[in-house]
Amino acid sequence: MKTVFSKRQRALRAELTRLGLGSLLVTHPPSWYYLTGFTGDAGALVVTRRGIALITDGRFVAQAAAETSRVRIVRQQGALAVAAGQFLRGIGAGSVGFDSSRVSVAQFESLRKLGGKQLRWTASPGVVEAFRARKDADELVRMRGAAAFADQVMQSAFKLLKPGIRELEISAEIEYQMKALGGSGFAFETIVAAGANSAYPHARPTSKRLRKNELVVLDLGVILAHYCSDISRTVVVGKATPRVRQWHRVVQEAQSAAIEAVQAGASCGDVDNAARKVLARHRLDRYFTHSTGHGLGIEVHEDPRVARGQRQLLEPGNVITIEPGVYVPGVGGIRIEDEVAVHPGRTEVLTRTPRDLIEI
Amino acid sequence: MKTVFSKRQRALRAELTRLGLGSLLVTHPPSWYYLTGFTGDAGALVVTRRGIALITDGRFVAQAAAETSRVRIVRQQGALAVAAGQFLRGIGAGSVGFDSSRVSVAQFESLRKLGGKQLRWTASPGVVEAFRARKDADELVRMRGAAAFADQVMQSAFKLLKPGIRELEISAEIEYQMKALGGSGFAFETIVAAGANSAYPHARPTSKRLRKNELVVLDLGVILAHYCSDISRTVVVGKATPRVRQWHRVVQEAQSAAIEAVQAGASCGDVDNAARKVLARHRLDRYFTHSTGHGLGIEVHEDPRVARGQRQLLEPGNVITIEPGVYVPGVGGIRIEDEVAVHPGRTEVLTRTPRDLIEI
């Protein structure tokens, strides 16, 4: 494992040189794991051209020492921004990059004050995130494992569905299985949305009981060895109406079109549009109220965003979800979601649960 | 429920007047729930002296309309900071308060640019958080319920402990029970830390199996009706050594001293110090590597912070944890945690599981 982290640190250092930065202040915990293996969630990481230091409080000092190697652990006293500012001044850092989209206005004020006058601050958003968006071989292995795990959990979730069971009972059972089978957690709160609730893309499970012939949207993700998975399927507990059957067919077609559009060099906006065009042809585009997909990895939502108008180009190593849907208020919703990895000259769908409408 | 939210909005408006602010941009989702009942997690809330508006994206528009009343729902197009800036300009907002500890440097740049020149921005951190720290009657009812629920889950967790079972199996079972019994979620990832793992205050459950006579720290919290609970107990699966017995006695004494120190008008630093002094008397203070406690409510970590040197005074309505511990690297740790509510002239311990060392 150590070689993976030191390789990533080396690549980041080359990037710092390219950007003309003496050091980078990394304030986002998932990026700490990516660079060092540290899994705590309080502190700040300082990467310089020569070394790497983790400033963290007493709760995490022993854990940081156990999880990392060749990282200087600095015990934080007082507020984080104060400690980080003082540390940067102490090591005589010159030009410091910081993630302006993650550092708050108040933190930045403290950093500037405590860092002193010799520090030159540069807004450098998303530097580590850009590396994380291009998964390396180690990460792809883990993501395949997490996706296979999600497939397995989805298959056993189907078996729970029957009239009378509550949304909350199903989600509790799903999350229990994730942990009991060895997952280290859920990538997000499991969605089990039945009947009219399925019209809310981000519904929380309620005490509502499933009724015969109702739509159920299942959206789940497990974390395995620090990497997230994410899959959605829509099921009818009984028999689908012709209307539901048509909606599902169109969403499935939209998803296939978007998956087809995925390739290195394609823009994220074009992939989004591929799904939207199919829905529009059937006049269902106004019921598709969110983006087509998102990157995932250590976090369940990462770069790149697969949304309308996004000009960012897909690259080998990207792993994204493709998850079009239709949501008809008061009636119900349908979503089909899979994970797609981008390789040079080809793509790989990581989740493999069949996509056809399931009637149980 | 509507009256609770409108009462809170009224109190906030009076505060805006006092602060000389025409409107407040609220960017922290738990505060949206506190003020409106909206449970989504993307968007921004704008409170003016006359009304309240929620800017949120397509995924949450229908949900926001169902969950709130008398809130203007504005569908977000493009980036949030852009949409919020344009909205504030559109309503002719004059002086706008924003939470400088939650708005990023990059967001603030967009807000300033899109808001135009007639907006005057004022850093106003923690305005809603200050209200949330003083729980109202409705909130105290929910927090008592959540605490009683946590007690119940802790009691049944004790029954799971036996040599051979894995930390992860125990945590999965605990979290399953929380959901199956009607909790809406976990306040945080359940901690089940056995043997040497218990020396990490924030350990994640692993596949390690419990062994006879080992220490196990259990730290769990359930969310009930949107409010969090938080309780920790330390158990020996077998018989405690004299050393463990002594550590536990000292931590228990430190906790009692801190709970005794809690009262309206006492400073948070003094409460922290009450625990630390007991540990110091037994030369265990250097093994107590975190703060004595934290506020909790809609979030599991809220104001006030019960930490070394904190001058903030406790007020009626505060609900805080008191959770001293000792953590001896390589050997093990002990933590005892309860929730305490501050009332005028008295306190109330919300969690009621016995605190004595439990040998199972």
Image (spheres, coloured by chain):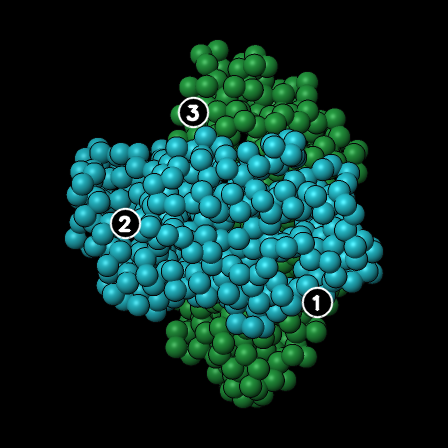
Chain colours: A green, B cyan
Measuring 46% from the left and 46% from the top, which residue is drawn there? Answer: B260
Residue B165 lies, in percent from the top left, at 79, 61
Instruction: Chain letter for mark 3, please.
Output: A
User: Vertical placement of B333 versus A169: above or below?
Assistant: above
- Pick the front one: B8 or B49: B8
State which mark lies toward you, 3 or 1. 1
Left or right of residue B93: residue A281 = right
- Classify residue A27 by image quadrant: top right
Q: Is residue B183 left or right of residue B40?
A: right
Res B46 label: 2
Task: Say what amino acid the circle numbered 2 marks.
Answer: Val
Marks 1 & 2, CB-CB < 8 Å contact: no
Position of residue B333 relative to residue A307, above or below, is above
Q: Secondary structure at mark 1?
A: helix
Instruction: Name the subunit of mark 1.
Output: B
Q: Residue at x 70, y 43 (%)?
A: B246
Count of numbered circles in the view = 3
Of labels 1 and 2, the one closer to you: 1
Q: Give the CA distance from mark 2 to mark 3.
A: 27 Å
The residue nearer to you, when weighing B3 against A69, is B3
The answer to whether tags 2 and 3 share a subunit is: no
Q: Which mark is residue B159?
A: 1
The structure residue drawn at horizontal position 55% and vertical position 33%, both measured from the top left corner, is B277
Query: Left or right: A71 with respect to B150?
Result: right
